[in-house]
Amino acid sequence: MKIGRKALLVLGAVVIVAAVVVVGVLYSRQAGDRADLNNRLDRAQTLLLGLTGSKNSLEDQLTSAQSSLDESSAKFPESVESIEYGEYLFEIAADCNVNLDSLTFPKPVASTVGGVACSVVSLTLPVTGTLENIFKFIDTIRTDDRFASTNVKTINMNIGGSKATITLDIYGYKG
């Protein structure tokens, strides 16, 4: 069987057209895939920028929180040493011209304040002196850096004003 020249040309043209169509379809698919990948890449880059900003913000918050924790921890003693605080209290009493009638230190009690584990020593301080000096003593305890972790809970004074019983809590940080 002999194929004519025209038939070969038509067959060749059909093969070329088929090849062009196949190449066109493949190119179209790849162009669609490329556009889809570019869109996904753009979204990922936008998300990355947002996440990077969030990460930086969270790192700043962490640094601030760590600094605040360190600052707060510095105000709270690791443990409440009765000898030291006893000396401080007698020193302040002498400076304020009041008599600290007695001082006993109970064992520290474990407590949690604002989610932070700490030890608490509750003291009852019976003092005698003038009304002005008793108030000076209380104010000194409240403002003295050595008592930064102290909370004055109650103050009971007799009617004459020369005797007072001061109840306070000293907090120690359990780090």
Image: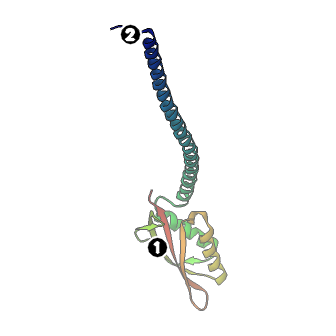
Q: Residues within 10 Å of mark 1 (few under 14, many from 20)?
A: many
Between the C-alphas of marks 2 and 1, the distance is 114 Å
Residue 85 position within the rendered picture, expressed as x and y whole percent measured from the top left: 51, 66
* Residue 29, above or below 83: above
Query: Which residue of the protein is positioned furthest toward the left in this rendering?
Result: 1
Q: Residues within 10 Å of mark 2 (few under 14, many from 20)?
A: few
Q: Residue at image x 50%, y 31%?
A: 28
Residue 175 position within the rendered picture, expressed as x and y whole percent measured from the top left: 45, 56
Q: Quadrant of residue 148?
A: bottom right
Residue 88 position within the rendered picture, expressed as x and y whole percent measured from the top left: 55, 66
Query: Which residue of the protein is positioned furthest toward the bottom in this rendering?
Result: 159
Which mark, by number, is residue 122?
Answer: 1
Of 38 and 158, nearer the camera is 38
Q: Is residue 71 left or right of residue 111?
A: right
Of 86 and 55, nearer the camera is 55
Which amino acid does the dot numbered 1 rest on?
Ser
* Residue 103, above or below 156: above
Q: Quadrant of residue 42?
A: top right
Q: Which residue is mark 2?
A: 3
* Residue 37, above or below 98: above
Q: Residue at image x 44%, y 9%?
A: 5
Residue 149 position within the rendered picture, expressed as x and y whole percent measured from the top left: 54, 65
Element carrying mark 1: strand
Which amino acid does the dot numbered 2 rest on?
Ile
